[in-house]
Amino acid sequence: MVCEIFSEQMGSSWGFIEEIGWRKGPWTSDEDRLLIEYVKLHGEGRWNSVARLTGLRRNGKSCRLRWVNYLRPDLKRGQITPHEERIILELHARWGNRWSTIARSLPGRTDNEIKNYWRTHFKKKIKNSSDNVEKSRARLWKRQQFQQQQQQINNQINNQIDIKKVMSLPTMPQAKQEMTILYPNNTIDQQDQVGFFYSSMLNNSTSISQSEPSSSNEDIMWDDLWNLDDFYGHFMINTTTYNKTNTTPCLQPMATTPAFY
DNA sequence: AATAAGTACAACCGCGGAGGG
DNA sequence: ACCCTCCGCGGTTGTACTTAT
């Protein structure tokens, strides 16, 4: 019966690409229904049998993809929440583009969804990253100046807060020196970038509650993250520490954690 | 209002690993 | 050991929709 319905509604007038028997392009609601019925009856898997058993003119790959990314009942709909975004960032720092691995930590989200989210929200900034290194350094320096001023003001206002730890942030040359010791095999340029990112991450983490006059903190944070993207492999993987029994990763940019950690 | 640029997301493709014959 | 099929993964493309100019 389902085959009859299918053949009635899947005429060539639909305008979709047909290639040697297999349909391509967007799925129709009827195709979805057939696939859902198939999974109800036979369970997930054996995707190449779908066409034979349902009359659906989709190949196994297409059926699996449609089910996994769109039809599965346990999928979470709606926008990625800020919390999920943080998780994605942290896990990407640890795993790189292993989207399926990242997706396992986000129930209801698919690898495809996370991959798309990453690309549209973050990846686009990479192309500008090399140009931004110098600009970011200037911003970093400016931010450090700003933070020091803020800290001085805070000191004056509230003597009970001990901010010595925050003020002990390493300078850029210090960070580079530490990286040279820790990762002597990296090139000078890599160490330069690594030290820079480390430094900027630290500064971002301390300035999170402060407002900065001329530019958005968020913009700066993302810009700096992009500078990191190309050398995660040299840095984050080596230095991200996690307990094997705890699947939640933590961003700890340096082996020698700064005082405020 | 028109259109170019940007964004979001569904879907396809190629590749490689696993497993069975 | 080899071949074949199936499956899953990551990269990429296509397109509808939104926003900016």
Image (cartoon, coloured by chain):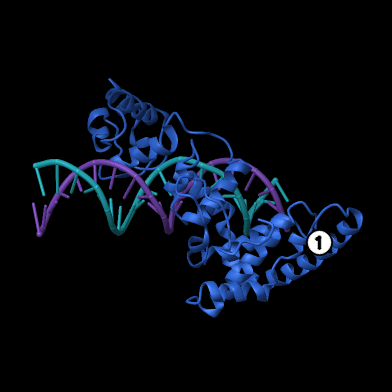
Chain colours: A blue, B cyan, C purple
Mark 1 secondary-structure assignment? loop
Q: Seen from this angle, which residue lies furthest right?
A: A156
For the N terminus of chain A, the image quarter is top left
Q: Horizontal placement of B15 versus A102: left or right?
A: left
Q: Position of residue A64 (x, y in %)?
A: 34, 38
Write down the quadrant of residue A225 in the picture.
bottom right
Of A108 and A256, nearer the camera is A256
Residue occupying the far top of the picture: A1
Outermost bottom residue: A188
**Residue C7 in the figure: left or right of residue B1:** left
Q: Is residue A22 visible?
A: no
Q: Return the residue at label 1.
A: A214
Q: Against A15, is A118 above or below? A: below
Instruction: Say which quadrant the C terminus of chain A sits in.
Output: bottom right
- For label 1, the crowd category at 10 Å Cα-Cα, with few meaning under 14, some 14 to 19 and many 20 or more, is few
Image check: A211 left or right of C9?
right
Q: Is residue A99 visible?
A: yes
Residue A255 in the image: state x and y as whole percent. Answer: 56, 63
Residue shown at 68% from the left, 73% from the top: A172
Q: Residue at x 47, y 47 (%)?
A: A102
Q: Residue at x 44, y 28 (%)?
A: A73
Give x and y (percent) for residue A188.
55, 79
Q: How many marks?
A: 1
Amino acid type at circle 1 is Ser
Chain identity of mark 1: A
Quarter of image, res A71: top left
Seen in the picture, residue A43 relative to A132 is either above or below; the reply is above
Q: Residue at x 60, y 73 (%)?
A: A178
From the top left corner, tell me how far across and down residue A240 is, in percent. Answer: 52, 58
